[in-house]
Image (tube, helix red, strand yellow):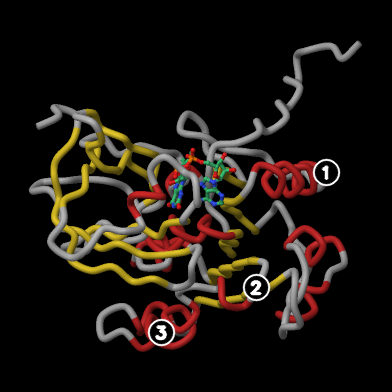
Amino acid sequence: MFPAYTEEEVLSVHHWTDRLFTLRTTRPAGYRFANGQFCMMGLPVDGKPLVRAYSFASANHEETLEFFSIKVPDGPLTSRLQHVKVGDKVLVGKRPTGTLTIGNLRPGRTLWLLATGTGLAPFLSVVKDPETYERFEQVILTHTCRHTEDLAYSEFLKSELPADELLGELVAPKLVYYPSVTREPFEHEGRITTLIETGRIFKDLGREPLDPKHDRLMLCGSSQMLADTADLLEAQGFEEGNSGEQGDYLVEKAFAGEKRPAKPRPDTAVV
Ligand SMILES: Cc1cc2nc3c(=O)[nH]c(=O)nc-3n(C[C@H](O)[C@H](O)[C@H](O)COP(=O)(O)OP(=O)(O)OC[C@H]3O[C@@H](n4cnc5c(N)ncnc54)[C@H](O)[C@@H]3O)c2cc1C
């Protein structure tokens, strides 16, 4: 119908809360992507594709595609998408893209995946990727939300994935899941930047503070979370990577919004 998209059938819909849901769809034949990447996804509206960027929550070895979505009450797409039912069709872009992939990180010992809100989505594919555990001795996934009910996939991450018939053996000894909330009492409370700055997360996990020699990070969240965390990392000597050059950390926005303040280039005089 639209040359840049295939129509995929909705196989399941799970509503976590009135703000969050998960969609599973068929996967186009021969569809290739790297874990951590995203595609355009949406619905035909008034004869045109109404699509938005969506990270793959499914790993690239899975037979179906999974998307973890926000419901923005007046959002052009999600005010509609949240009502899709099993058997409905969605549009999936033919060209996945994105730089939040382990191949863009320098070799290291520990991989930290820092997510807020739906920024968890790309890391769901990364933690299901066997290569992640071949490249890193330990994988620490943090998910920060306002309320405990927003901690979608927590049972999956805590219990199901480590017990998975195929992946469990790789995942169980290496994956650490660290959820935190900012607006109600919980076992871990506070923004991820605060937990890092105060050293609380390292104390909780019995680890040394971050070290650019062997820690590698991927960040996915709001512009503010990304800017604050990147500042904190840069101050400690971590270097950002991209598709052209491997780095110590990588950044992906969980949604488009206010732009991340640009980093001054090292060759640019600041006046
Ligand atoms: C690289 C990339 C990957 C993305 N991956 C996902 C994903 O996996 N899941 C997902 O739900 N969204 C994701 N998004 C956001 C997504 O593209 C849409 O913004 C979202 O689906 C809402 O669409 P909309 O048309 O309803 O509202 P929009 O007009 O797109 O957004 C309206 C407003 O809602 C807020 N908003 C939008 N998305 C979010 C969100 N995810 N969390 C909190 N607030 C938000 C923002 O303030 C935005 O200005 C991604 C965005 C980018 C740039």
- Number of labels in the image equals 3
Task: Point out residue 153 in the picture as x, y percentages from the top left corner.
Answer: 45, 75
The numbered mark, 1 or 3, whose residue comes first in the sequence reads 3
The numbered mark, 3 or 2, whose residue comes first in the sequence reads 2
Q: Residues within 10 Å of mark 1 (few under 14, many from 20)?
A: few
Task: Point out residue 35 in the picture as x, y percentages from the top left corner.
Answer: 35, 53
Q: Is mark 1 within 8 Å of ligand 1?
A: no
For residue 147, which numbered disc appears in the image? 2
The answer to which quarter of the image holds residue 3 is top left
Circle 1 residue: 235
- Is 86 placed above or below 238 here? below
For residue 162, which numbered disc appears in the image? 3
Q: Is residue 15 left or right of residue 205?
A: left
Q: Quadrant of the C terminus?
A: top right
Point 66% across, 42% down: residue: 223
Judged from the image, the secondary structure of the residue bearing numbered disc 2 is loop
Task: Point out residue 98 in the picture as x, y percentages from the top left corner.
Answer: 41, 38
Is 231 or 93 nearer to us in this picture? 93
Amino acid type indicated by mark 3: Pro
Mark in front: 2 vs 1: 2
Q: CA distance from mark 1 to mark 3?
A: 34 Å
Is 134 or 56 nearer to us in this picture? 56
